[in-house]
Image (cartoon, rainbow, N blue to C red):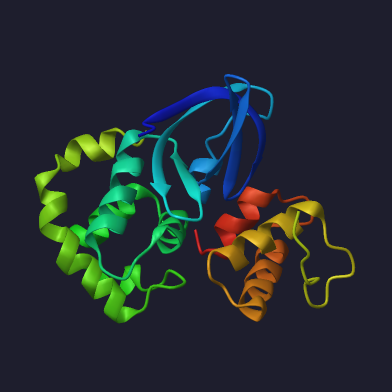
Amino acid sequence: MIATIQGTLTDAGPLFAIIEAGGLGYELSIPVTTAEKLPPVGQNTMLYVHDVYREDAALLYGFADRASRDFFKLVIEKVSGIGPRTAISLMSRFPLTYLLEAIAGSDSVALAKCPGIGPKTAERIIIELKDKIREWSLHSCISAVSGKSVTPINNSGNISEDEKDALDALLALGYKASEAEKALSKARKQLGENADTQSLIRRALGN
């Protein structure tokens, strides 16, 4: 079992990071909230890791802090019908503190705003996690959080690399192409032509 990985960040995007350690490059799936905290490529970094082994693949998921990693494990292991992709989408949509507060407060409407999480799934998350989250020290959890081809955005003459990366990320998080393009187009208008990938994703997700 891999608990953490530390090494040189050699490549990164909104939903992935590649860290070179011991002469090997490890690719990890990460939520947007972790991508925002990564250092520039070429610098040293450390991520908390959850590994998933299947017959056809060995998958690594990375998080900026232990609380986020533990929450991810709790979701995929305790909530029926939610796999790693949906959990990553959920954690990309909301900061951990918000998720903990929404679950503790039985706010299914807030959780259902995440792509791939409908009202029934939101209710199930609350039912299956509310008591388990109470078993954590909520205060401790909160304090611990301190190449694809894409379709051009409608009505945009030139699409930047940041916008392409943002669109790929939204599609990977479960948005339909038309929804992703609409959300990203709106974000671009609000933030301006020079907005970076992370800013575009956060605004498109409604944050």
Q: How many marks?
A: 0
Q: Report x, y in % for residue 105.
A: 18, 62
- Whole-percent x and y of residue 30? 50, 46
- Answer above or below: position of 174 versus 48: below
21 to 79, vertically: above or below: above
Q: Residue at x 82, y 56 (%)?
A: 160
Nearer-the-camera pick, 30 or 80: 80
Q: Which residue does the image show at 62% across and 71% down from the upper left?
A: 183
Residue 168 image offset from top left, x and y in percent = 67, 61
Residue shown at 77% from the left, 50% from the top? 194
Q: Is residue 192 left or right of residue 45?
A: right
Which residue reaches farthest right? 157
Q: Quadrant of residue 25?
A: top right
User: Can residue 119 be seen in this snapshot?
Assistant: yes
Q: If the image is split into quadrants, where does the N terminus sit?
A: top left
**Could you tell me if residue 105 is visible in this image?**
no
Q: Nearer the viewer, residue 65 or 105?
A: 65
Q: Quadrant of residue 175?
A: bottom right
Image side of residue 11 versus residue 52, left or right:
right
Residue beneath the point at 50% across and 56% down? 56
Q: Nearer the viewer, residue 116 or 94?
A: 116
From the viewer's side, name the closer residue of 10 and 95: 10
Q: Is residue 17 left or right of residue 64?
A: right
In x, y percent, where is residue 18? 61, 36
